[in-house]
Image (cartoon, rainbow, N blue to C red):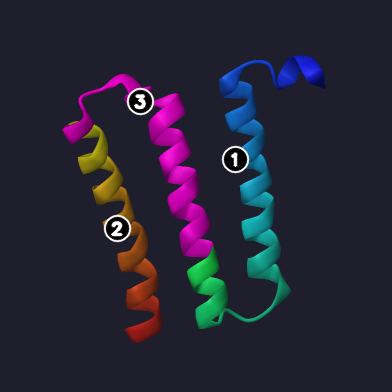
Amino acid sequence: MRHLTQNSLNRTWLILIGLTLLTTAIAESSALTTVSVTAITLIVIVKGRLIIREYMDMKSANPVLYWALIAYMVLFSTAMPLSFLFG
């Protein structure tokens, strides 16, 4: 197991798997409430940031482009649950 965590992409992959399992557990544990939808949305934002930073290798990109992509991801990640809650 130690050799899996020496590479940053492997660590990120393991974190993404864990967050996916957590999201599944939240979604399957109860009816979708405001709290569970908010928790899932926050997990999606964290996962998106990890993917943008590590797998798209944006950590060395122009900061304006990096933060614009993060803002785009956060905007659309929060728009979907808001439409679910208020739609």
Q: At label 1, which amino acid type do we have?
A: Leu
Residue at image position (45%, 35%) is 51
Q: Nearer the viewer, residue 31 or 68?
A: 68
Mark number, residue 46: none
Tell which residue pokes out farthest to the front in this image: 63
Residue 50 is covered by the magenta coloring: yes
Q: At label 2, which amino acid type do we have?
A: Phe
Q: Quadrant of the N terminus?
A: top right
Identify the main secondary structure in magenta.
Answer: helix
Circle 3 Cα neighbour tier, 10 Å, few/some/many (<14 / 14–19 / ≥20): few
Residue 67 is covered by the magenta coloring: no
The residue range painted magenta reads 40-64
Residue at image position (48%, 53%) is 44
Residue 34 appears at what percent x and percent y?
Answer: 50, 81
Mark number, residue 76: 2
Residue 72 appears at what percent x and percent y?
Answer: 24, 49
Query: Mark 3: which secondary structure?
Result: helix
Residue at image position (20%, 42%) is 68
Name which of mark 1 and mark 2 comes first in the sequence: 1
Q: Which residue is mark 1?
A: 16
Query: Mark 2: which secondary structure?
Result: helix
Circle 1 Cα neighbour tier, 10 Å, few/some/many (<14 / 14–19 / ≥20): some
